[in-house]
Amino acid sequence: MKAHEAAQLYFNRAADLMDLSDNMRRLLSIPKREVQVQIPVELDNGEIATFVGYRVQHDDARGPMKGGLRYHPAVDLDEIRALASLMTWKTAVVNIPYGGAKGGIAIDPRKHSVREMELITRKFVDQIHDLIGPDTDIPAPDMGTGAQEMAWFLNQYEKYHGYSPACVTGKPVELHGAEGREEATGRGVGILAFKLMSRLGRKPANTRVALQGFGNVGSYCAAFLAEADFKIVALSDLSGAYFRPDGIDVSAALRHARHNRGSLEGFSGTEKLTNAELLELDVELLIPAALGGVITAENAPRIKAPIIIEAANAPTTPDADALLHDRGAVILPDILANAGGVTVSYFEWAQNRQHYNWGLSRVRQELDKALSDGFERVWDMSNQRKVSLRTAAYFIGIGRVGRATVLGGIR
Ligand code: GLU
């Protein structure tokens, strides 16, 4: 199933139970604007290569649109469209004053030099700078991008529009970035894991965790969970999965990756598994923090974890979600679970506009509050309406966006 069809299924499942009118459903489903651009560049070897970039602006009823830029070979319009809609519901669930958007380039950044990636990023900005801005649409990092890409993005944008630090978030702290932004998504997953476990009456020390993905989200999440006394028994990245039933020394894994260009390849003292095997381990908590669509109807029957926290965007297909739900598994959905990133993006944007630095402890404190409030609302809604946490999150997200749309009026 394609990514957008899956996103629509989740939306429609909630919309059905909310008795949302067909007109409102259509309005909230069709993106406001979709852009596809050509990015031709001269590679280091003198050859001309042409890439395709996208920006989908899904909805702006609650504020400027917000969402990351993904650099990955699987990027296409359908995927970006799906991810843009998730951003609309995500920003609404944690109640930050944004709509949703997403962008990306179909490219494998590992196959290109730093110079090529800089050129490609700048050319992408040349194509879309008129469509984005601090009050309209604010990009940020996503898979395959980070603070460096955001710095190039800012610099190129400012060539057209002058000083505008708030046009993009996730910037380096030396260049109008916010302390605490880089760690925010992983930290947020950790904060929510802690809350969810205590609601379910489980202690971190008795919770074995399998964590898929050791990029920005996975690595900060692992560090937070280890600090909070969770027992991480498996980690993974593109090189495969690393399993140790007694628990992995997470600081050793982080050190290993730091000295090995970010990769866990060769991490010793563990049994080597595949990424697919990691998902099926006998653990209490499974955290997919990498690609979308990894939990499917095919492998769901073999997934043993009773609790799943979706650190990645769209890791569970709707049919797998239904199978797991029927079996009694608890799934904390992406639109809440990984909302820490966009929440601290909002704090970065607010600081840029205030010309005032909040400092790390205030950022962390406010992140904790925003996610705790979001969690409590979703938890209560799920209990009141007797629906899954995902459907409860969609109720809240769709409700807020729908009300803002109606209140603003359509003229
Ligand atoms: N790419 C992240 C997400 O999927 C962060 C977006 C942002 O900070 O705007 O939520």
Image (cartoon, rainbow, N blue to C red):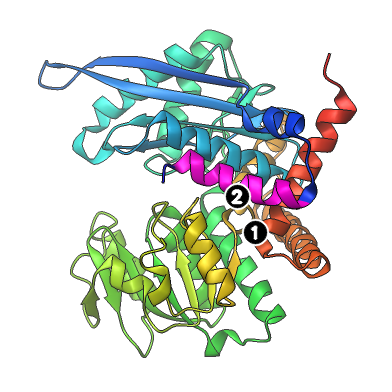
What residue does disc 1 label? Answer: 390
On whether residue 297 falls in the magenta region, the answer is no
Q: Identify the secondary structure beneath mark 2.
A: helix
Residue 382 shows in this picture: yes
On whether residue 10 falls in the magenta region, the answer is yes
What residue does disc 2 label? Answer: 10
Q: Residue 90's x, y, as percent?
A: 65, 46
Residue 361 shows in this picture: no
Q: Is residue 42 above or below residue 227?
A: above
Q: In percent of the image, x 63 and y 34: which residue is there?
A: 100
Q: Amino acid at mark 1?
A: Arg
Q: Which residues are magenta?
A: 3-17
Q: In percent of the image, x 23 and y 41: which residue is there?
A: 110
Q: Is residue 38 left or right of residue 164?
A: left
Q: Residue 127's x, y, as percent?
A: 44, 12
Q: Is residue 281 left or right of residue 317?
A: left
Q: Are marks 1 and 2 in contact (CB under 8 Å)?
A: yes
Q: Earlier in the sequence, mark 1 or mark 2?
A: 2
Task: State the predominant SS element of the stretch in magenta.
Answer: helix
Q: Residue 349's x, y, as percent?
A: 66, 35
* Total numbered circles: 2
Which image quadrant is residue 101 in?
Answer: top right
Q: Amino acid at mark 2?
A: Tyr
Q: Identify the secondary structure beneath mark 1.
A: helix
Which image quadrant is residue 215 in?
Answer: bottom left
